[in-house]
Each structure stands twice: as structure tokens, then as C-alpha cells.
Image (spheres, coloured by chain):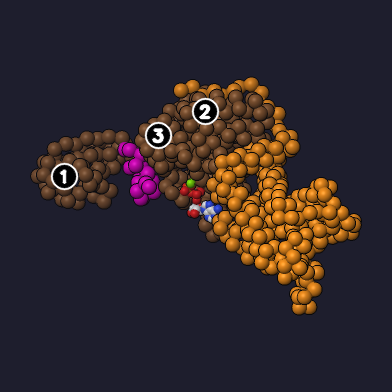
Chain colours: A brown, B orange
Amino acid sequence: METDLAIRARGLRRAFGNLKAVDGIDLDVPRGMIFAILGPNGAGKTTLLRMLATLTRPDDGTAQVMGHDLARHPERVRAAIAMTGQFASLDEDLTGHENLVMLARLWGFGWRAGRGRAAELLAAFDLSDAAKKQVKDYSGGMRRRLDIAASLIVTPGVLFLDEPTTGLDPSARAGVWRLIRGLAAEGVTILLTTQYLEEADQLAGRIAVIDHGRKIAEGTSRELKAQTGSGMLHVTPLDPGNRQIALGLLGEAAQSDPEGGRISVPVADDAEASAHLARLAEANIRLAEFSLGAPSLDEVFFALTGREAA
Amino acid sequence: MSIPLPRGPRPAAPSPASTALTFAWRAVLKFRHVPEQLFDLVMTPIMFTLLFTFIFGGALAGSSTAYLQWFIPGILVQTTVFNTVYSGMGLSTDLSKGLFDRFRSLPIWSLAPFAGLMAGDMLRHTIAGAIILGIGLGLGYRPEAGLSGILGSWLLLMAVGFGWGWIFIVLGLVLRTPMTVMTLGFAVLFPVTFASNIMVDPATMPGWLQAFVAVNPISSMTTAMRSLMAGTAALPEIGLALLSPALLTLALAPLVLWLYRRK
Ligand SMILES: Nc1ncnc2c1ncn2[C@@H]1O[C@H](COP(=O)(O)OP(=O)(O)O)[C@@H](O)[C@H]1O
Ligand SMILES: [Mg+2]
């Protein structure tokens, strides 16, 4: 039994009617890591997280969370985890402080200790000024922070975060990222889902890409990029009028970036890159710029699924 | 930013009583922050009380005051039963907002959130009942048994609210939106409370309706309420009134647990 794993899942499945929301997923999440589940809308991210958090029953498969079996000891799993769902799970009518006191009481704190813990968390999450405001008057970023604070009444072994930054403006997003990094630095294992490739790239030690309920790739950001081939060749024709011709010469996999006039094509190695450049030179297409780079996660996603990421 | 993450032992799990108290506290806070919800709870019964007492009272019972003696125990039953609809709506809202997921992922007794809802409901039934009774007393209603009658009636109402509350917990779990819960709830409760002995003595109703009124559990609960308020309550009467709350609890509590676990 690998006790160094925070989560070990094998063959998790869950269908809703005929729809296979999660269709056989294995997952190994090491302790202390930020692990990202990356996938477009409807990929099955929420269903997967809810199963691991004991909120949705798997139809099939097994999982251990912090060493506790999901099916046999769901109550032990619940004691070891905290979950912040995709939509704020707060009482909108209550104030931020009251929400946290209520949850602290449900964790077994006395009234006085519960109020203390609530105040401490509000201060740490920069919400002290809004402590006495009803949650329905909170901004999206404040709500998200309070929702995460509500998951930290006691220190969880694993924190599940379902799309923690969806719908937030860039500065609120940066705030949540700082928070997630801070928690990971304290040793909390974090399993988060995201539709943003950049987010997974920025935060996660490992990334699992899922689509249609299946895991289609997993690895570090660098490993995933390597799976797409050694990299991407980017070229920018000097004369924008030549863009279509260049696209034709570079083959089916070539994609044109609508804004900058840049064309990108995946290449297996530098010999293939040189061959592409030679073909353009033969056709007398002069280039303003060319470069060979590791593919971005967007390009990885495209290569893996054959479609654009959400 | 440093996040305070305690490493020491966690507090021991709360007792069911302490959990219920927390949920009741939540209900009190909701009253404080959203006092408008009191309107939902008491508007209809207040309207009914005034309407029936002053418009129909004289015709039905000879005088408004005489009618109040008949009507107030019954409208208290109706208020309580109607208010269980609002708790079903509240549950449906909590479920759709994801708040229940938060409760469910806590290591507490899995029925605790429902026990908590019930605790909050008892408070709401008490407040709504007190307001209606207060209005009745102001208009001239006089329970013969005095304070002990009121206390006995209150206990019966709590049992009614508890038992009938399960119906709307089930609907709250099964139906997708709070509005559906309300529409369906009142579509059933309006006829069931009117076809009872709450408003009028069924003696003048057609025979088939009298037969229904006789077996309608709302009628037996109302009859017991009247006897409690009058100080003439007999054990079989109370037993009959408690029958539907008891049966509903026995049948629906396990169903709620099953629905909840199945999710
Ligand atoms: N409770 C449910 N009932 C029916 N279908 C559902 C339910 N939950 C999710 N689904 C469906 O399962 C699929 C995966 O959903 P979800 O796990 O929410 O994906 P994601 O979080 O990646 O967007 C979607 O097609 C969604 O419509
Ligand atoms: Mg989702």
C-alpha cells in the first residue's frame, strides 16, 4: 500500500443515464502536491471530484483518500478532506463571519473557539472588513476566498478545489493562485480542476488531462509538452498576403494565429523544422520571424483531443 | 499572506444536540437578516383569520367572537402545515446552492442536516404560531384551558410540523427548483386543508365530502387542538391526531435517508 499517496483511484466510473460522465479513471496524487485536472466543460471534472469527496457514488472502481477507502470508510475520508465546489457553498443570507462560525460549530468548536477561528480565517483571507456583511453582497473574488476559508476550519489532508478561478477577474485570480501556493507550501495536498491551461501550467506539479470522462494524458507540464513532439515551429511571413500559401505548404497540422499572422506547426525534430523552412524558401516566401519552441498547453490539448480547449 | 492552519488535535465531533442547536441558530440569524420571510409564514393565515372571522364568522357561528373559538385552533394547524412547504423550499435552495454539499462533506451524522432543518422549522412554527395566536387573542379568542391549553397545543403543533415536514423534505430532495416545491405543495395543501373541519363544521357538506373530512388527518389534528385549548382533550383524540405525523415519520425518514445516500 503506497502511503505516500494522498489519493489513489482505480477505474472510477459514473454514468448519468446513458451519459458516461466519468468513464474509468485512474489517479495517483502524491502527498503535498498541487495536482491539476485539466479538461473542457463537461469533461467529467466535477463528477470525478465529487466522487473522491464522497458526495457522488461511483458506479464502479475503487479509491483511497489519505489511506482511507472511499467505499468502506467514507466518514474517515470526510474527516481527512475539504471541498470547495464549483459554485460557492455558502449561506448567502448570513454574514461571512456567521458562515464560518456555523461551520466551526459543526466541526465541534465551542461558541467562543468557533468565533475565534472565524475571525482568524477572515483576517488571513483579507476579509475582516467584510466580516459583518451578508455574503450576497460579496464580490466574486471575496466569495471565492470565503468559500476556500470555509474549507480550512480544520486543516485538511487533501483540499479539493473545483474550478477555483472560473469567472474571476485577473487580479482576483492572482489572489486565489497565491492562496493555493501558500496552502501547498504548508503541506496541504491540493487537487484542483481547471479549464485554463495556463492555470494548470502555473500551479500544478502534475496535470491529468481529461476529456469525455477519460484521462487522455498525464504528466508534468513539461512531459505533456514533450508528448506532442519536440516542439512547434512558428513562422511569420513578411508579406501577410503569403499567409495562405505558407499554410498550404506546411501541411494539415499547421495553424494560423488570426491576430499576429503567425503560423505554427508541430514538428518531430529540428530536421523536420529545417525541411519546412526550406520549402518556404523555395516558394520565395520571405519570413519576418521564425522560432522553434516547446508547445504551449493549448497546443498540447489540441494535439491530444483534436479540438480547441474551451 | 500566511494562513493559520492548526496542527494540533481537532475538536471532538459535536453531539447531535449541539449540531441541532447550531442549525437552530442559523434559522434565528435568517430571521434577523431576512425578516421579510415572516410575511411568507404569517400573511396567508392572518388574511384567513380576518377574512373568515369578520366576513363569514357571523353567518357561520352567530358572531365573530364565537367563530374565533372555532377557527383559531384550526388555523394554527393550517399555518404549521403550510409552513412546512417553506422549509421544503429552503432545503431545495440549499441543495441548489451547494450548501448541502458542504454539510454532507463534514464528518457529522448524515441525517444531522435534516435534524438541523427540523430544529429551525420548530422555531419557525413557534414564531408563526405565536403571532397567529396573539392576533386571535387580540380579537377576542379565549382558550378555556388557558396557558396549559396553549402549551399542550404547542406540543401537538410541533409534532404536526415534524411529521408533515418530511413530505416537503422529500419533495425538496426530489424536485429541482424551490418554485416547483411551492407550487406542488400548495396545490395539494389548499384542498386538503379546506376539505377539513378547520373553517366550518362539516355537518352541512354533501355526504361524500363529509366522508373525506372524517378521514382527513387535518381534521383529527384540528379536533385535538380544539380539545386541548378547551381543556377537554382525551387520550384517543390525541392519539388519532398523532397518527399521521407518526406514520409520515416512519415512512418518509428512511426514504429521505435513502434519497440522500443515493445522490
Ligand atoms: N447530476 C447529473 N445528472 C445528469 N447529468 C449530469 C449530472 N452531473 C453531471 N452530469 C453530466 O455529466 C457530464 C460531466 O459533467 P461534469 O462532471 O460536471 O463536467 P465538468 O465539471 O468537467 O464540466 C456532463 O455532460 C454533465 O451534463
Ligand atoms: Mg464542473
What residue does disc 1 label? Answer: A279
Secondary structure of residue under mark 1:
helix
Residue denoted by label 2: A122
- Residue drawn where x is 81% and y is 61% of the image: B223
Proximity of marks 1 and 3: CB atoms separated by less than 8 Å: no
Amino acid type of the residue tagged 2 in the rendering: Leu
Residue A119: give x, y in percent of width and height.
55, 26
Q: Is label 3 in contact with label 2 (beta carbons under 8 Å)?
A: no
Q: What percent of the width, then of the height, locates residue B112? A: 70, 42
Q: Are marks 1 and 3 on the same chain?
A: yes
Judged left or right of residue B134, residue A150 is left
Q: Position of residue B134 (x, y in %)?
A: 71, 50
Q: Earlier in the sequence, mark 1 or mark 3?
A: 3
Alpha carbon distance from label 1 to label 3: 47 Å
Mark 2 Cα shell of 10 Å, populated few (<14), some (14-19), many (≥20): many
Residue A172, numbered circle: 3
Image x and y of residue A210, in percent: 46, 45
Q: Is residue A287 magenta?
A: no
Q: Secondary structure at mark 2?
A: helix
Q: What is the chain identity of the residue bearing mark 1? A: A
Q: Where does the magenta region start and end?
A: A295-310
Estimate the spatial distance between the alpha carbons at disc 1 and disc 2, rounded to whole Å.
Answer: 61 Å
* Residue drawn at x 65%, y 56% as measured from the top left: B46
